[in-house]
Amino acid sequence: MYYPHTERCPEAHKLSLKKAHVAIVGAGGLGSNVAMLLARAGVGSLTIFDFDKVEIHNLNRQHYFPAHLGIPKVLALKAQLVALNPEITVVTHETFVDESNIKTLLEPYTYIVEAVDVAETKALIVEQVLSNLETAFVVSASGMAGTNSANTIKTHHPLTRLFLCGDLVSDVGDNLGLWPTRVMLCAAHQAQKILELIIKGGQHA
Amino acid sequence: MHIQLNGQKKEIPEHTTLEQLVEGLKFNASRIAVEINGQIKTYDASKSQRLCPGDKVEIVAFVGGG
């Protein structure tokens, strides 16, 4: 069987991608799209954490279809990732990541995608990971609600081991709505930064 | 005294704590992550820390959506 996912990838990068294991916290608009992009790029292993089931209001921006309604997101996503790239390893946890379990759950990982929706949970994940896990990088997202230009979504590097994708200000709590385009732009920024970190072995300023 | 706040020079009173700085800037303390001189600690563990002249303080504020 021929799997094309690293066909267009330079030879030197294929092994790095294949060996990489990325943790994704949240399998909603950000996490489901980040996961699909990393699977397409040939990342070898993903571990995905999410407690929710697929609901109808998720379908505008999250990588799910009506057939997935009512199914745990991590299982619906795993099925799609394996269908896309049969070589990938996907570990799923139907778990809500919080202060009590975050260190234990995320300790094994160097590359962690923060892909939850609540601002307080984003802050908790970032500060707990960076203060407890000394070698971990977090690629987080903040500010993708609303209808402003695609060009406002950027990858920022505000703290030593934190990359932050988004426009930093557009809060879904301000009733701006969430468009699939801006959410997926933000997810693509996150996935791109993870790929850069993998290829450069974390040697990234 | 002067500190560096998010890359900008900022004048603050002597003995200001991190918590006083955050409250003065009107940040929501439950939506931030803070690094002081390249070291990140949880906000609860570092909020009573008094800032020193020349400290480099980075405050990241998060908004909702995903």
Image: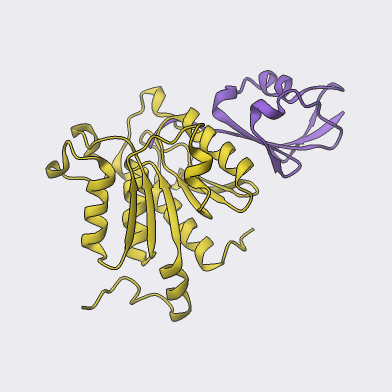
Chain colours: A yellow, B purple
Residue A129 coordinates in the image, percent (x, y): 56, 42
Q: Is residue A87 visible?
A: yes
Horizontally, residue B11 falls left or right of residue B42, namely right
* In front of the other: A65 or A155: A65
Residue B42 coordinates in the image, percent (x, y): 64, 32
User: Vertically, is A151 above or below A52?
Assistant: below
User: Vertically, is A197 above or below A23?
Assistant: below
Name, please, the residue furthest toward the left.
Answer: A67
* In front of the other: A119 or A111: A111
* Residue A178 picture quarter: top left
Residue A17 coordinates in the image, percent (x, y): 43, 68
- At x 24%, y 47%, the residue is A75
- At x 40%, y 24%, the residue is A173
- At x 61%, y 49%, the residue is A161
* In front of the other: A4 or B27: A4
Locate the C terminus of chain A by quadrant.
bottom right
Residue A2 coordinates in the image, percent (x, y): 23, 78
Q: Is residue A165 visible?
A: no
Report the number of discs: 0
Horizontally, residue B66 falls left or right of residue B25, namely left
Horizontally, residue B14 falls left or right of residue A59, namely right
Name, please, the residue furthest toward the bottom.
Answer: A11
* Residue A60 picture quarter: top left
Locate the N terminus of chain A by quadrant.
bottom left
- At x 45%, y 64%, the residue is A20
Horizontally, residue A153 falls left or right of residue A65, namely right
